[in-house]
Image (cartoon, rainbow, N blue to C red):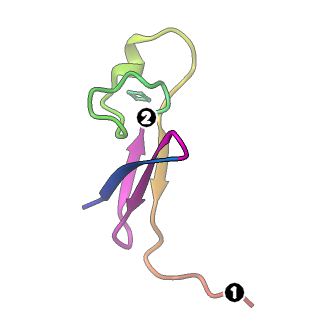
């Protein structure tokens, strides 16, 4: 399950999220979700094309060459 924490830094709020390998989350970018930072589907009631940001954690680390 995604773990997230919101903190204020330099007067701005920022959220740090940690995912388990293979975990998938939908993050709100319409700023209307009641479950922020997660998408709750509210964007479907709005005009425009804005939808969620989908984040998928890899099953395992990718090794760099
Ligand atoms: S509720 Fe905001 S993107 Fe879905």
Mark 2 sits near ligand 1, with its Cβ under 8 Å away: yes
Q: Nearer the viewer, residue 40 or 34?
A: 34
Q: Is residue 14 left or right of residue 2?
A: right
Residue 28 is labelled as 2
Which residues make up the magenta segment?
10-27
Helix, strand or loop for disc 2 = loop
Q: Quadrant of the N terminus?
A: bottom left
Q: Is residue 34 magenta?
A: no
> Looking at the image, in which quadrant does ligand 1 appear?
top left
| Image: 46 above or below 51 | above
Helix, strand or loop for disc 1 = loop
Residue 45, percent across and down? 38, 12
Check disc 2: other Cα within 10 Å, few if <14, some if 14-19, many if 20+.
Answer: many
* Residue visible at 29% across and 60% down in the picture: 3
Prevailing secondary structure of the magenta residues: strand
- Tag 1 residue: 64
Residue reaching furthest to the top: 47
* Residue visible at 44% across and 11% down in the picture: 46
């Amino acid at each position: 399950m995604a773990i997230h924490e919101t903190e204020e830094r330099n007067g701005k709020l920022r959220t740090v999220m940690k995912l388990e390998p293979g975990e998938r989350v939908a993050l709100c970018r319409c700023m209307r979700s009641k479950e922020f930072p997660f998408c709750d589907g509210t964007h479907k009631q709005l005009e425009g094309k804005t939808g969620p940001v989908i984040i998928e954690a890899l099953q395992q680390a990718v090794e760099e060459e």
